[in-house]
Amino acid sequence: MHETVIPVSPDWAEGALINRARYEEMYAQSIADPEGFWRDVAKRIDWIKPFTKVKDVSYDPADFRIRWFEDGTLNVSANCIDRHLAKHADKTAIFWEGDSPTEMRNITYQQLHDEVCRFANTLLAHGVKKGDRVTIYMPMIPEAAFAMLACTRIGAVHSVVFGGFSPDSLAGRIQDCGSTVVITADQGIRGGKTVPLKANTDLALTQCPDVKHVLVVKRTGAKVPMMAGRDVDYFEFAATMPTTCKPVEMGAEDPLFILYTSGSTGKPKGVLHTTGGYLVYTAFTHEVVFDYRPGDVYWCTADVGWVTGHSYLLYGPLANAATTVMFEGIPNYPNVSRFWEVIDKYKVSIFYTAPTAIRALMRDGEEPVKSTSRASLRLLGTVGEPINPEAWLWYHRVVGEERCPIVDTWWQTETGGILISPLPGATDLKPGSATKPLFGIKPELVDSNGNILEGAVSGNLVLADSWPGQMRSVYGDHQRFINTYFRTYKGKYFTGDGCRRDEDGYYWITGRVDDVINVAGHRLGTAEVESALVENTKVAEAAVVAYPHEVKGQAIYAYVTLKAGQPVTDTLADELKKFVAEHLSPIAKPDVILFTPALPKTRSGKIMRRILRKIAEGDTSNLGDTSTLADPSVVSELIERAKQTS
Ligand code: 6R9
């Protein structure tokens, strides 16, 4: 364990938006008087009709509700664009850096306004109304941002599906929320390779008869089939659209977007966020966590297909009139200095990325970093998974030259925004710890019976109260929302994460305690990967677990039993890996497939994943209690086979 402590530097203590005394004072106030605290914070947003009620929350399943600012009205796109125009019309809203370093666009707030209005008018012309769901399956190009903001302008609810998902995954998400309009591109381009987005959409739509219109944005210019009456060339159509469009007045609790995320069981859940609380929370946390100032150039490397891309690439920064960098490419194309070159090119001052990217770049040594200047940087951030102290220290020393504090931000799709994180001017840093709760956040550690654990201890992380950015429902299945998050521990939101608290009250997230796995910061359910495997006609049964991986954090280990008479050929493992990549996503491709005649099950038929995890980790010395196994000989057989495979 690293017990390194990196104290707040005198410069930061003096110059930061929030210093230690202020953090402590504000935190105490936010807990003592949440209504008063959030009433003040919410003033940063332009309300059409001001709210009178701040908070109405009950986590009791019998009387459940989560409402913030509920009688206020507002429009998100007006808050992210229109209200900045008087002062910042010519300020850059988005610096877009293409996959190739020769491609770039600089979009001012005025241009953002015009393009969003054009897009909004295009949606209206295709019959999209307030409350309708629009699925967005796009590469990282400005039109993805325009499309999202356009939805918010007219009160449509966007569901962004990451461009790396397969046609089947896209189809499931379109059907679940009942979108009748899909926005996509001809192709995406990442690391010099094209991604067949339109072709994937066409395949998905063979399962989605209700989709009436597909807006196709030209990215690479590849020739793609266009279905007459359904498919629309976006640029051709939008050219005829006006550049003004009245923002629709939305209730604070009206749905803003749906974003699908993996849970421990079943299909991915449509996490539903609403309008007022989400915008207040993302704007506020973007400012305080990143110590954001008007002159900053801020870069979050996340894809808009993930929640980080929603909250901290788009909505938080734009609500604060920031300049946000949007990057289409990958960290190692055309070379492994790309991140640092982009930082120099746009004079990025705040840089926010994932531990997996840092670990991958670390492997190439210090030279590719040191050959760049990075003089503009003043703050670094991480998100998505626990960061190991070694990677943290490298990021701090090599990338930030010990000048830039690192904010290790813990949060989830469900939480809408950051909940546990250092504030750079207030919190002494410990490599690997997300440190302290933000304002209004009451973390608690509980044991499996729900007893609250005090002091320096490990347990399950729960949150004892609500915050404005919290998700409000699972789309179409409100009971599932209540059951998943509020029934395990009475009166608390259960995060699904394990966590340790140290003597200084610092929080160290240890990872998921459920069947969610985190591969390179991407969240996947073991059940999703298993069901993709059993879709293959050769597979009888599959059990998937995660094991530690040097770069990706976790990797996927799949135990597979085949149907009777099905031989294990030399190519079968590769065939199944490819099958999962195509049917779910390349992210979900198992690293190891182990064929086995049987899986270890309890007498009631439950697969004992604990044992499978141990075998995958290569730690078979202590498998724990195996007495409930229906057939203990399965285990020794598995251990033998695992040795041969590794
Ligand atoms: C924002 C995002 C959420 C899960 C979460 C946890 C892990 C995220 C982390 C972290 C340790 C951090 N996680 N940030 N673990 N330290 N700073 O990633 O949302 O994709 O929903 O994943 O990611 O396990 O529960 P999401």
Image (spheres, grey):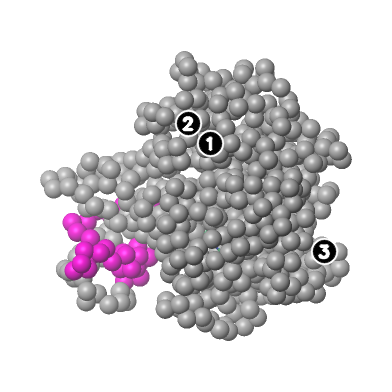
The residue lying at 77 percent from left, 61 percent from top is 40
Indicate whether 300 appears above or below 603. Answer: above
- Residue at numbered disc 1: 132
Q: Is residue 66 located in the magenta-colored stretch of the structure?
A: no
The stretch of residues the image draws in magenta is 591-620
Q: Is residue 602 magenta?
A: yes
Q: Is residue 79 above or below residue 382?
A: above
- The residue beneath circle 3 is 16
Residue 583 horizontal side relative to residue 495, left or right: left
Q: Quadrant of residue 148?
A: top right
The C terminus lies in quadrant: bottom left
The disc at residue 180 is: 2
- Kind of residue indicated by mark 2: Thr
Disc 2: CA contacts within 10 A as few (<14), some (14-19) or many (>=20): many
Task: Tell me the kind of residue under disc 3.
Answer: Ala
Q: Amino acid at mark 1?
A: Asp
Q: Is residue 404 visible?
A: no
Determine whether the beta carbon of the residue marked 2 sits less than 8 angstroms from the nearest atom of ligand 1: no
Q: Is residue 96 left or right of residue 9?
A: left
Outermost residue toward the top? 228
Which mark sits nearer the N-terminus, 1 or 2?
1
